[in-house]
Amino acid sequence: MARRSTFEDHLFALNLPFKRKKRTRAEELRELVHEAIEELDLLDHRGKLRDFGVTFDRMPNRHFDYWLFDELLVQLGAGAGRRGIRKPLNQLRVVSWRKSAADLSTAIRIVCRNYDELKFSRMLVFPLEGDQAGCRLTKGLYRA
């Protein structure tokens, strides 16, 4: 029997099942968000969903992971019963939440404290009520 080439060995290895499941950053973040929500007792689904704007200033000369921050907001919105976030402008995210702006800000700060990539100098969470007008805003869901 002829020996397999290195390419065939690598191709064969692709078909083997993984011995253990690797945890992704999204799974770790999801668990951390659920722990923070339980710790703050924010699991109550009473009240109506309201839209909140979230904007922040990242720390100067630091690497800020925007994907991870967006995933954090997606998970918080999913915990409130909504799918996805909207991003009408570059530094503004819109997330749906059932509690107050202070509760949302506290939940975000608790989770961001555990990630060096999510260090920001300032953050503003504010309710979006009534009509908003703008020019060339992005429409639809940004992340789901």
Image (cartoon, rainbow, N blue to C red):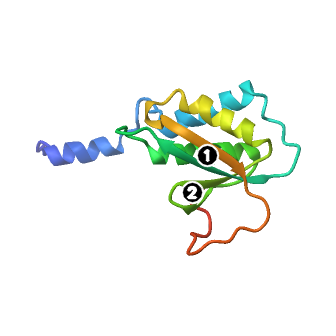
Query: Could you say which is closer to the camera, residue 58 or residue 116?
Result: 58
Q: Are marks 1 and 2 in contact (CB under 8 Å)?
A: yes
Q: Quadrant of the N terminus?
A: top left
Residue at 47% in and 48% down: 67
**Res 140 quadrant in image:** bottom right
Query: Could you say which is closer to the camera, residue 91 or residue 73?
Result: 91
Amino acid tagged 2: Arg
Residue at 14% in and 43% down: 6
Residue 83: percent from the left, percent from the top? Answer: 68, 54
As drawn, 23 above or below 13: above
Residue 62: percent from the left, percent from the top? Answer: 37, 37
Label 1 belongs to which residue? 73
Q: Nearer the viewer, mark 1 or mark 2?
A: 1
Amino acid tagged 1: Leu
Left or right of residue 88: residue 60 = left
Label 2 belongs to which residue? 143
Left or right of residue 29: residue 19 = left
Residue at 78% in and 34% down: 42
Residue 56: percent from the left, percent from the top? Answer: 54, 45
Residue at 80% in and 45% down: 98
Query: Could you say which is closer to the camera, residue 83 or residue 22?
Result: 83
Residue 138: percent from the left, percent from the top? Answer: 57, 69
Circle 1 residues within 10 Å: few <14, some 14–19, many ≥20: many
Q: Secondary structure at mark 1?
A: helix
Left or right of residue 117: residue 32 = right
